[in-house]
Each structure stands twice: as C-alpha cells, then as structure tokens.
Amino acid sequence: MGGGASAALWMRRLDADRFERLAGTEDGAQPFWSLDGRQIGFFAQGKLKKMRLADRALETLCDVPATYARGGAWSPKGIILFGVNYKGLMRLPESGGEPVPVAGLDSSIQENSLRFPQFLADGNHFLYFSRTLDPRNHALYLDALDTVGKRPRRKVVAADGPSAVGHDPFSARDFLVFPKEGRLWAQRFEIGSGRLLGEKTAISDDVGQFGVPLTGTLVFRRAGAEQNTLRWFDRSGRALESVGKPGDYWDVELSPDDSYAAAINHRSSDGRFWLETIDLARNVQSPFSDAPLRSFAPVWSRDSKQLYFNSLVNGGSTILAKPVDATGSARPLVNCANRYDLRDLSPDAKIFLADHEIEPDHFAIATATAGEFRWQPLEQTSASMMKGQFSPDGRSVAYQSNESGAIEIYVVDFPAVQRKQRISTAGGIEPRWRHDGKELFYLAPGGVLMSIATAGPTGFYRARPAPLFKFLGRSQDAGFQYAVYHDGRKFLVVNGAVETNARDLSVVFNWPQQLRGEGGQ
C-alpha cells in the first residue's frame, strides 16, 4: 500500500550521463541481474518479476509481498534466490512457479531476516546477510544449494549490511566488499573455500548503496543521498522552512497543540528504527525511544503531553507510553502476540485505532479501549484496511482499503460502522483531517495531496476532491508522509530528496589497485 511519487526502475550505461526509465517497472524495487546481463529481476506490486532487456518483455514469476521482499540473486544454473522478511530465503526456477523455503531463521541469535543473497561463480554457493534483533550479531553467511539445511552454514564476517564479491582482473584476485561501522571495507576472499585472507581495508567512509561488478569497477551512492528532510509546505506547494535535521524519516505526527513533531527515523546500516521529537518553537530535536527498540507508529495523547508508540518484538509488538518531557525509558502498556501499529486516539481519549497485520500485505483496522487493549476489528471484511484516523468529533473514521480492487479512501460512521462512503475517485492513501473537521486530506497516486470539504453532521460528502500540490514522499510502505497544521494552511511533509540523476552515482574504476597491503600487492 505504498504511495508518494510514482517509482520505477531506471538504467544508466556507465558510458552515458543519463538514466533511462524502464517502462513496465512501476513500483519496482531491489533489482538484480542475470549472470549474462541480459535480464533483470525485481519486485513490484506484490510480485517477483523479470524483464528481458533486448525487447523489454516482462514476466511475472511468483507472488512476493512487496513490503517483505529482501533482495534476490540469479544463479547461472537457472535458480533464483530471494529473501522474505521474518521468514528466510526462498528459491524458485527462473521460469517461475511456487517458491520453496531454502533457509530459515535461527531463533538462538534472534535472527529476523535473511536478505540480499549473492551467488558465487559456481552457481551453487551463495552469500547472504543475516539481520538480528541485536546488531552485534549481524553477519554475512556462506551456504550452498546442494547442502543447505544439511550442513551448518559458515559465518564469513560480522557486517552491518549486504555484501558484494568483486574481482580484480589484473591480479585475478577476488574480494568481499561489505559495510561495517559506517565504512565500506574490502578483504581478500577465496572463492573456492569461502575464506577471508589478510586484513580488511577501508574503501570509503560515505557509502550507502553499492555494486561491485567483476570488472574491477565500484559503483555507489553516497549515504547522504538516501536522506530526506521534514519541511513545511503551504497549500500551493510552496516550500517553507525545514524542521530538524536530515534523516531517513518513515513517519511524522504533529502534537494536537502543534508544538511538537514526532518522527520515526531509520538507519539502514543496522536496521534501527527509533522515535524522535522536535520542539517546533526552538527547532530542537531529541531522541525519544530507547536505543535497542525498533520503534514505530507514534500517536499523541489529546493533551499533547504524552506519546504512545509500538516496538516490534519477535513478530509481535509491545505498546509503550512516555511523557514528552520525561527522562528514562518508556512504560510498556501491553505485549501483543501479533503486530499492531498504533494510528490514532479518539477525541475522548478512550479508543485507540491500530493497523493489525494479519499476514504480509494484509491488514485490518483494530480498535481497543485505552488501558485494556483488547483488540477488536473495526469492520468484518476480507479487504485490507489501514491508516485509520478519527474525525475531530469522533463520529467517523477515515481509512484506506483495497476492497474495490484499488486502494481508495473511505469514511465510515463510528462506533456503529453502518454507513460508509468512498471519498477518493482514482486511488488514495493516508487520510488526514483538519482539526475542525471541515476538510479531509489524502494522497492520490503520484504523490498529489488532495482535499475534500466535509458535508456537515451527516458525514457524507457531495464535493469532488481537489488537488493541492505534489511532493516527493516515500515510495515504500511506511507511516504517514505528512501531517496537517491545525487550520490546514500548511503541512509538515517527509520531503524526499531530489529525483535521482547521473550525479547521484559515483564510479571508481580499478578500485582494487588503490588498496594497500594485502589488497593491492
């Protein structure tokens, strides 16, 4: 249920200065190459797909929940491996079919994701990154298709993210390239045995995403290019002042009195998600949740004095609360066996709304009385519903749902849940109310912020939604990409970076020759 600016895959030849948009790859992410470079695999719209570059022919291989895909690899033997968050590694033939599990999770080290596999030259052995709840256990592992599950996997090196195997055509030596402690490292790698040789050497102090072909070339995007900002925009789309520091923000919430912003920040190197607050009058930003927690979904108390949020724990979640001016740890309120992301609190502060994850990419909106947290579905339906928001008078709930086949915005009366109306006309996500309840906002496809005037006490709408402006938000599933100032005259937006262009990529030729000691001799 992603939104924001329309995403797609783009390709650039290294001898060109422009990107080419690959038609048919809308919402595409995490691309990977076939060994001969003639095809690209990628994830889009809940599917694993491939494209033949010669004629741009597309083929769907299998279903993969879009928010759970974690990278793929293509063996020269015609096997595709891919990661699924919270499950492990899956395999299927390159012709498509039903994926089968290859490697599961090790609960003894609190492993929660096996991701971004990479085949070695024999097409049998493969590397992958293991992410755990404790970042100290993050590591790269080596396994093989013909022995996986039969023999213990081999831990290659501690790392903070996915790796790549590079080759020096001049010395015929191979290298493992991996991120650790904020730097990108290279170390001699013996393909046949899977052993590391010598000492690791730092390549760069500022590398985000990277790729290492077998030609002695390093292509990378600097870590700073992955950040975004929190910024005010007026109703015409005119950019106003920025708020706080640049970061990788996944959610933003304004306190009811507009004095604070709460935001979920993310660091990809160790998979951290944490909650921060920003005093808007002084533009002072402070960490709010404890460092070990993976925190999501902040919700303000109605008096703006307290924040509720949830933390993921072993597939479930813990709901916590903490006064905005308090020191120390947040107070746990309830442990949930399943994941519940808080979304709103009713005006009388008695009822919470939350996104309940039933299965990957399938959500229900749940309600619970504050203090009790006995979750009940808002509506009995097979559709996926999420992002529920109470109207300011508490008599309606706006939300997004795919019940029509497309994701649209609906409003239903509350608590009876007997009258419902579709609000959006051509797709919509992330509904938000103005504080007086006289206007409802949402994001249409392409990241266009829409507005519709309410119809009075009946709660049903007669006006057509009108576009306000377009902004670059997130393309992946997250929380809310924007928050509404009380009078609706401005919006605090998770403002994405400028659109990617050729200058965002750095290319280093013959990079192994620049190493010292074991790498360059």
Image (spheres, helix red, strand yellow):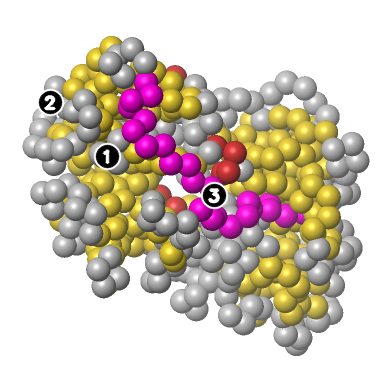
Residue 516 lies, in percent from the top left, at 37, 16
Q: Which residues are magenta?
A: 492-515
Residue 84 visible to the viewer: no
Residue 486 numbered tag:
none
Instruction: State left or right for residue 335 relative to residue 190.
Output: right
Task: From the viewer's perspective, tell me whether residue 367 is left or right of residue 15.
Answer: right
215 in relation to 489, above or below: above
| Residue at point 21%, 25% (across, down) | 171
Mark nearer the N terminus (3 vs 1):
1
Q: Earlier in the sequence, mark 1 or mark 2?
A: 2
Provide the secondary structure element on which disc 1 rests.
loop
Q: Amino acid at mark 2?
A: Gly
Distance between the alpha carbons at the discs numbered 3 and 1: 22 Å
Is 515 left, or right, of 338 in this rendering?
Answer: left
Q: Which mark is residue 503?
A: 3
Q: Are marks 1 and 2 in contact (CB under 8 Å)?
A: no
Is 318 colored magenta in this rendering? Answer: no
For the residues bearing labels 3 and 2, Cβ distance under 8 angstroms: no
Q: Which residue is mark 1?
A: 215
Task: Name the residue nearer the viewer: 210 or 426.
Answer: 210
Residue 238, image quadrant: bottom right
Badge 3: how crowded within 10 Å, few (<14), some, or many (20+)?
few
Q: Which of the two marks, 1 or 2, is nearer to us in this view?
A: 1
